[in-house]
Image: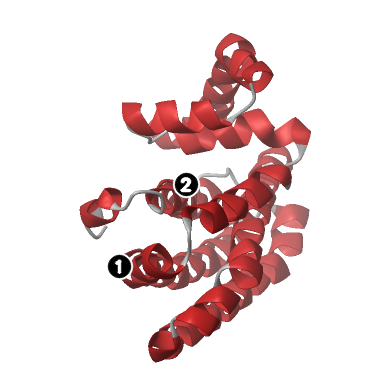
């Protein structure tokens, strides 16, 4: 992985780097999880498919927020770098295409959980990850500079608020756990400080344990 330490120095856009870590981690785990499903284990295949759908929904919401709230502002305010913004939009389309391929292959794998269909799916997931990492790397190295220069903290906060509002309530603690998993202590304090007091209490009383159990069960074949 590229070193994105310089992005951490930006006053408010660093939170995008933290969110990107979730997609980097999970896109790397998904092909391995698919390959680890025993031949014919339909229940386990269904569990991994549900995890993929959660991942895909999160990535869709993240990119939709950028498409609707970031790229139009940068088009208007950072005209000399318009080519970069257009490239980001093109990369979103490419990522969507790779996810479409994954979703084309999922039904056969869910029906059979065969090694052949699983390998085809794992390869499609690896292609998706390659396209995603290309985009995330370029976004962190170049686009965050434009955001810090051309968007106010209030405008950036509106992007984050929209993202939080779109998380289904029954998924909120899982999403929080995914973000906090690889966060530094400082980042943990920041994100926990953004959630309502009741949600923070739920995280400490039940959410953290629930997320840990979920991760252990999901990744058990990779750590055995």
Q: Nearer the viewer, residue 5 or 60?
A: 5
Horizontal relation, residue 45 to residue 29: left or right? right
Q: Quadrant of the N terminus?
A: bottom left
Query: In the image, is residue 200 above or below residue 36?
Result: above
Secondary structure under tag 1 reads helix
Which residue is under mark 2? 22
Residue at 61% over, 53% down: 158
Marks 2 and 1, Cα distance to the nearest angstrom? 18 Å
**In the picture, residue 190 is in which quadrant?**
top left
Q: Position of residue 189 (x, y in %)?
A: 42, 26
Does any portion of residue 40 appear in the rendered image? no
Residue at 56% over, 69% down: 70
Q: Residues within 10 Å of mark 1 (few under 14, many from 20)?
A: some
Query: In the image, is residue 169 above or below residue 45?
Result: above
**In the picture, residue 209 is in which quadrant?**
top right
Query: Residue 141, labelled with which disc?
Result: 1
Residue at 63% over, 62% down: 65
Does any portion of residue 207 appear in the rendered image? yes
């Amino acid at each position: 992985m590229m070193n994105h330490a310089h992005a951490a120095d930006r006053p408010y856009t660093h939170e995008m780097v933290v969110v990107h870590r979730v997609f980097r981690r999970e896109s790397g785990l998904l092909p391995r999880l698919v390959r680890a499903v025993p031949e014919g284990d339909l229940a386990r295949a269904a569990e991994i498919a549900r995890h993929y759908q959660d991942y895909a929904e999160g990535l869709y919401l993240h990119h939709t927020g950028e498409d609707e709230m970031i790229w139009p502002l940068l088009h208007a305010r950072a005209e000399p770098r318009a080519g970069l913004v257009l490239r980001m939009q093109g990369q979103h389309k490419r990522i969507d295409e790779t996810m479409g391929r994954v979703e084309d292959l999922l039904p056969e794998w869910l029906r059979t959980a065969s090694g052949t269909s699983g390998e085809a799916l794992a390869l499609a997931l690896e292609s998706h990850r390659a396209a995603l990492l290309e985009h995330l790397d370029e976004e962190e190295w170049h686009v965050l500079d434009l955001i810090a220069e051309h968007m106010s903290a209030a405008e950036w906060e509106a992007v984050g608020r929209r993202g939080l509002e779109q998380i289904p309530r029954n998924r909120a603690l899982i999403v929080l756990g995914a973000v906090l998993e690889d966060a530094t202590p400082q980042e943990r304090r920041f994100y926990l400080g953004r959630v309502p007091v009741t949600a923070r209490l739920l995280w400490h009383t039940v959410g953290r344990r629930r997320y840990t159990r979920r991760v252990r069960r999901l990744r058990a074949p990779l750590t055995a």
